[in-house]
Image (spheres, helix red, strand yellow):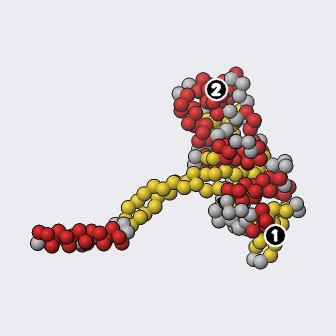
Amino acid sequence: MSEESFYNVVLGSQDAFDLQKLADALSRASGMVRLDALSHIRSHWGILYRTKEMEKAQDLRQKLEQEGVETFILDNMQLKAILPPKLLKKVIPKPEGLVLEENEREKILPWDNFILICSGQVEESIMVKKKSSADEGAARKIASLAVFLTTGIPVSAKNTKPEEEVKKETSSNYYLDIIAKENAESLSISGYSFDYSYLGNRKQYNIFANFSNLVKDTAGFLPNAVRNRGVRSLEQGGGTFRDFRYRSIEEYEAEKLWLLQLLKK
């Protein structure tokens, strides 16, 4: 059974990404409520619209062009996917390439292998099972004993076994991803588990300072690679660090996916 076709209307230039202007244009061109258009762009970045109907995609492209927004159309078979990332805990950016340690041997990946560099502080939500603490159980037993001594009525403490409670917790992490030309292979670094020893006397107690140095060192060897919003904000500095933050891993990955389409078109 063949896969069902979808057609994606894709923003044609990274420099054309202006959230508010795009929301206005997409709302007028598609008939979408502006708030919905804004939400869609925040979640999908430059992949502005997806439909099963080619004619509808072409019509929207023409209307967006009238709004001054350049786009192109990709069906789902043409949409380039990023492979699951290879997680790295220790690398050294050097002029000759990115140095990896594998099986106690160094492997050098030349910088011209890479076409895209992405980074950001990403909010992540996870569901966590928590048990009531032993102190809570002890407190219940003491309360039961107090009731018995006061009233003579025994109170069962059999329910003092720790109970599991599922809670949603939100935390943030720092990510650095570089994407290779061939097969869109992705190398990924998590800021909180990375070994920053290569920084030498530049290493600080502040993890963000260490991570930002890692990103800027890596980006410095990739002058021709496309940068996401997060990398741009670190390189520019000057109070733009709000652009380094992403509300979810999905938002971070969506921008990366869109930028890959621009490179492959």
Label 2: element kind: helix
Q: Position of residue 43 (x, y in %)?
A: 59, 42
Q: Give left or right: position of 115 versus 241.
A: right
Q: Position of residue 72 (x, y in %)?
A: 72, 34
Q: Hey, what amino acid is under mark 1?
A: Lys
Q: What residue sits 80% from the left and 56% below the top? A: 217
User: Which residue extends farthest left?
Assistant: 152
Q: What residue sits 85% from the left and 62% below the top? A: 94
In the rendered image, the vertical position of residue 194 relative to residue 233, given as above or below: below
Q: Quadrant of the C terminus?
A: top right
User: Which residue extends farthest front?
Assistant: 150
Q: What residue sits 48% from the left and 56% below the top? A: 169
N-terminal-most mark, 2 or 1: 2
Graded by Cα atoms within 10 Å as few (under 14), some (14 to 19) or many (20 or more), the crowding at tag 2 reads many
Q: Hey, what amino acid is under mark 2?
A: Ala
In this orientation, does residue 77 appear?
Answer: no
Q: Which mark is residue 107?
A: 1
Residue 66 sits in quarter: top right
Graded by Cα atoms within 10 Å as few (under 14), some (14 to 19) or many (20 or more), the crowding at tag 1 reads some
In the rendered image, the vertical position of residue 43 relative to residue 55, given as above or below: below
Q: Position of residue 219 (x, y in %)?
A: 80, 53
| Pointer 2 with pointer 1, Cβ within 8 A | no
Residue 142 sits in quarter: bottom left
Label 1: element kind: strand
Q: Which mark is residue 25?
A: 2
Residue in the foreground of this view, choosing between 170 and 57 = 170
Q: Give left or right: position of 120 versus 147.
A: right
